[in-house]
Image (spheres, rainbow, N blue to C red):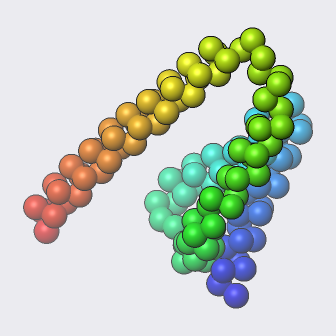
Amino acid sequence: MVVLRGFLVLVVFFLLGEAVRVLVGLPISGGVLGMVMATFTLMLRGRVTDELAAASQGLISVLVLLITPGVVGVFFIADQFAGHWTAVVVALVLGTLLSVFTTLLLMKKLTTEQTRGDQHD
């Protein structure tokens, strides 16, 4: 029952994201908007509930299955990218480098704060 409540929370945020996307007309996935709203909500609360953590653990274990349909879909529309491969490659390389750099900075900041917190205990 705990996992079902966590999935319900995730579905509610997904539906909120879809509602915002439709009402505002944004060209962004409702799931992405929902996860951004969930992230801000969790940041404001300062913690993750046990229900949400349990549901998230279940999703993380099958994350590859959630990503695969999008990757396969790109294969079928590859002809639409004709003449734009340079922009696609630059976007992929820059996006990858930015995500790795951001992860590095975040990990460095969090480990520094954790080390400081351990010294004060």
| Residue appearing at x 49%, y 33% in the figure | 96
Q: What percent of the width, then of the height, locates residue 95? A: 53, 29
Q: Is residue 11 left or right of residue 109?
A: right
Image coordinates for residue 105, horizontal then vertical, percent = 32, 38
Position of residue 79 relative to residue 43, above or below, is above
Pick whichever, 114 or 95, lies toward us: 95
| Residue drawn at x 33%, y 41% as measured from the top left | 104
In percent of width and height, residue 89 lies at 59, 22
Which residue in the rendered view is the most extreme toward the bottom?
Answer: 1
Can residue 18 be seen at all in this image of the molecule? Answer: yes
Look at the picture and state if 120 lies above or below 101.
below
* Residue that protrudes farthest toward the left in the picture: 119
Name the image quarter holding the C terminus.
Answer: bottom left
Q: Is residue 18 left or right of residue 55?
A: right
Position of residue 23 relative to residue 72, above or below, is above
- Residue depicted at 44% across the width and 30% down the height: 97
Residue 87 rendering spot, x and y as whole percentages: 64, 15
Name which quarter of the figure residue 90 lies in.
Answer: top right
Viewport quadrant of the N terminus: bottom right
* Residue 52 visible in the current orientation: no
**Residue in the picture at 68% in, 61% down:** 65
